[in-house]
Image (cartoon, grey):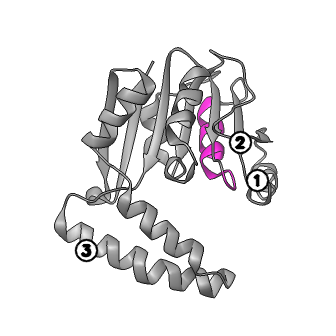
Amino acid sequence: RQKLVDWSEAKAGDQILDVATGTGDLALLFKKQVGETGRVIGSDFCKEMLDLAPPKAQKQNLAIEFQQADAMDLPFDSNQFDVVSIAYGIRNVADPAKAVQEMIRVLKPGGRLMILETGDQQNPIIQKAFQLYFSKIVPWLGKVATGQKQAYVYLNQSSLSFPAGKSFCQWLGEVGDCSDIQFKSLMGGASFLYRVQV
């Protein structure tokens, strides 16, 4: 997540929107980056997850706004943010293309859309390790921690079927009508970081 913040080139005073913020971990990092003069909003569709975020921000004395919102219908003006981010969330949106279009809509000209995501692994050794971890270990941990295994089985299936790397960049270019798209492979290909400049 810190690599996402660093590559976003967010600076003091910037306006940041973190979509699918969950419990706010990425929003916290962004607030530290943009300082008191910057504004960070963390949005999420799931109220239960979002409710856990404000106490974390308060504990670190960070002024962050948290708002329940649908990634496919963001309640923000166009051309409002310097950076919009989403970490491990785009594959779980009902219509990822619509979500990308919405995130690009709310970006200022020259703004950056930052996406951190898993996907189809290209290194066969990493692919096997990743598959074992997500198919066996994560569902087991999920069952122990929450009593629910099925959601974590879905996480594995969605991770393995989601496009990554160059194929995801091509998809982004098509649905977002943009051409300045870069990506980095992280952790030997276990995750991918994308940057779209509008």
What distance separates the C-alpha of mark 3 from that of mark 2? 34 Å
Describe the element under mark 1 as helix, strand or loop: helix
- Say whether marks 1 and 2 touch (CB < 8 Å): yes
Question: In the image, which residues are magenta?
Answer: 22-34
Q: Residue at x 31, y 32 (%)?
A: 182
Q: Earlier in the sequence, mark 3 or mark 2?
A: 2
Query: Principal SS element in the magenta part?
Result: helix
Please, what is the three-letter code of the amino acid marked with disc 1?
A: Leu
Mark pair 3, 1: CA separation: 33 Å
Q: In the image, what residue type sits under mark 3?
A: Lys
Q: CA distance from mark 1 to mark 2?
A: 8 Å
Image disc number at residue 43:
2
Q: Is residue 23 magenta?
A: yes
Image quarter (top left, top right, bottom left or bottom right) of the C terminus: top left
Q: Who comes first in sequence, dot 3 or dot 1? A: 1
The residue that mark 3 highlights is: 128
Label 1 belongs to which residue?
Answer: 50
5 lies above or below 139 = above
Crowding at dot 2, Cα within 10 Å, few <14 / some 14-19 / many 20+, comes out as: many
Q: Are marks 3 and 2 in contact (CB under 8 Å)?
A: no
